[in-house]
Amino acid sequence: LAQMGVKSFKRFLKDRKVPEPKRAKCTTLQLNIGLYCNQACSHCHVESSPLRKEMMSQEVVDRCLLLLKNSPGVKYLDITGGAPELNDGFRRLVEGATALRESQKRELTIIDRCNLTVLLEPGQETLPNFLAEHKVHVIASLPSYEAEQTDKQRGRKIFERS
């Protein structure tokens, strides 16, 4: 970029008398565990859909749990990615994080970014109880409070199913 005459970010800030950002402690571990989703939303920045089969492997789930175990400053585990609940490693990740929270007697909030319609998918009948049992905070996404707008972005009758 320098060859094109673009200033470094550091120089850009200095020219505007903006102090350099200071690195803070990491308190959130956000994991995008896959691209498989039961919806194909037009606004999805990672283009998740029922056609995407990429999912976090069990080996990577284990590595993430090890990272979490060795990162006591992490207070939030934020799980996202397509419909994370449909990922093969989702429950194992939540169970492992719950076990760490209890064994280490630490403050750890587990967050599931949920599209809500996943609760109606075959095989997910136990999901609400699982989330409650593990004290998972559900962040429900709905692009609009209006059915027409939601269905336009997410597909026919998605608002009703949500």
Image (cartoon, rainbow, N blue to C red):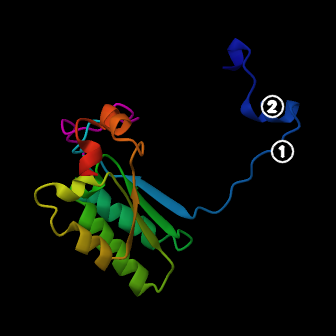
Per the rendered image, the range of residues in magenta is 41-54
Q: Which residue is mark 2?
A: 11
In this view, the residue farthest toward the top is: 4
How many marks the image carries: the answer is 2
Amino acid found under the numbered disc labelled 1: Pro
Residue nearest the observer in this picture, 115 or 62: 115
Residue 96 within the segment the image draws in magenta: no
User: In the picture shown, does residue 135 fall above or below 93?
Assistant: below
| Element class at badge 2 | helix
Q: Quadrant of the N terminus?
A: top right
Mark number displayed over residue 19: 1
Amino acid found under the numbered disc labelled 2: Arg
Q: Position of residue 11 (x, y in %)?
A: 80, 31
Report if residue 74 is visible in the image. yes
Q: Position of residue 30 (x, y in %)?
A: 45, 56
User: In the picture shown, does residue 117 fall above or below 46?
Assistant: below
| Main SS category, magenta section | loop
Mark number displayed over residue 127: none
What residue is rendered at 73% in x and 32% in y?
A: 9
In this view, the residue farthest toward the left is: 122
Task: Examine the image and state in which quarter residue 134 appears.
Answer: bottom left
Task: Examine the image and state in which quarter residue 151 appears.
Answer: top left
Q: Position of residue 66 (x, y in %)?
A: 39, 68
Residue 50 within the segment the image draws in magenta: yes
What residue is rendered at 69% in x and 54% in y?
A: 23
Q: Between disc 2 and disc 1, whose residue precedes?
A: 2
User: In the picture shown, does residue 51 fall above or below 133?
Assistant: above
Residue nearest the observer in this picture, 46 or 56: 46
Report if residue 41 is visible in the image. no
Few, some or many residues within 10 Å of mark 2 (<14, 14–19, 20+): few
Separation of residues labelled 2 and 1 (CA atoms) = 11 Å
Q: Classify residue 22 as left or right of residue 150.
A: right
